[in-house]
Image: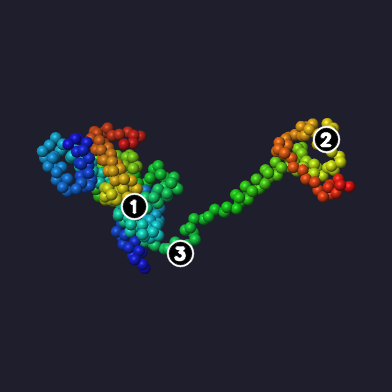
Amino acid sequence: MDDATRWIEALYRETGRQLLTYLSQRVGCAVAEDLLQETFAAALRHPERLRASSSARAYLFGIARNLAATASRRAAREAEPVFWNLAADEESPPDPRLDLMRDGIARLKPEFREALEMRLKHELSYDEIAEALDVPVGTVRSRLHHAVNQLRRLLRQPQGNSISEKEQL
Amino acid sequence: MTQEILNRLLIDRSLGALAPDVTALLDGYLEREPDHSEVAGEIEESVRLAKLALRSGPAIQLPPLKLLPLRERPPAERRPRRAWWPAELAAALVLGIGLGFLAFRPGEPARVKVETAAATVPIETVDSGSSNAFWSVQRLARMEPKTASTRGPRVTWKSFLQNSQANN
């Protein structure tokens, strides 16, 4: 086993679960495992690119994102990814605002939602998100700010007066 | 500090992306300006709830990594290549039939035949003075459709046989 393979395996142990969660929410569990393997196989094909990237995790997220997008297009599921059927967690404390928040996140623009997910769920830094999404850091900051402002406006509304189903935040 | 700048700083802070020194300055500002505390609280709460909503879900088991080199993968994993020859064969057939139809349309004199006839007519039979003669202008005008050969200068060729007949 060469150094590159050992390194990729270490990265797999470190970031594999995050990437699998990310992929599962985008393409479903059945395809996610294959795409996870493909992500690391792609990284192993060009280890020099992985080494040259400022963040290996961000680079892997970028590959996973591209693979998920290709798989979604192939399955014609781009418009309604599996991700955003966020189920309530049985272990989380009961809070009626959480349902409202799940609904609000599901109706965010995809690019806002994706940046928010990468920051809050996978804990990528702004720079890592920028590398994974292949956009400037300023764009990442702007998307995150839009997302937070929209969720904040949603929480301000009275409980029984939530945004209509068709309206996208 | 404008409200817009303050909002940006508050959001960056709630997302954990503000440098510690800037965070300390921001906290100091909020202590001096308690009117903004409500906005700060709303943003913090929104991010906290979003984090909770996003982090919910069942735990996922990580499968073992299978890093098979591409050359060792079973053929079934490779995408099958589409056969190219049926489409190309069909295209060649259609093209051939089309060109053949255009070249040998029934009822129209083929250009090749006219030129061959012109080349094989004995030179003694040509009478340029008569209106119905083979080389007469009237006859050329009657020829339809006009082909490219009637528009430009015509090149004629005499065979050795014709030359020897003419000399005799």
Question: For this view, does A81 lie left or right of residue B164?
Answer: left
Q: Position of residue A155 (x, y in %)?
A: 24, 37
Specify few, some or many for label 1: CA neighbours under 10 Å numbering under 14, 14-19, or 20 or more.
many
Residue B72 - label: 3
Dot label at residue B128: 2
Determine whether, in the image, residue B147 is placed left or right of residue A57. Answer: right
Output the chain of dot 2: B
Residue type at mark 3 is Glu
Specify few, some or many for label 3: CA neighbours under 10 Å numbering under 14, 14-19, or 20 or more: few
**Amino acid identity at mark 1:** Phe
Residue at 33% x, 40% y is A109
Q: Dot 1 lies on which element?
A: helix
Q: CA distance from mark 2 to mark 1?
A: 87 Å
Whether residues under marks 1 and 3 lie with C-beta atoms below 8 angstroms apart, the answer is no
| Whether residue B25 can be seen here | yes
Q: Position of residue A46 (x, y in %)?
A: 39, 59
User: Which residue is more in the foreground, A27 or A2?
Assistant: A2
Q: Are marks 2 and 1 on the same chain?
A: no
Q: Residue at x 53, y 55 (%)?
A: B81
Circles 2 and 1 in contact, beta carbons < 8 Å: no
| Residue where numbered disc 1 is placed | A61
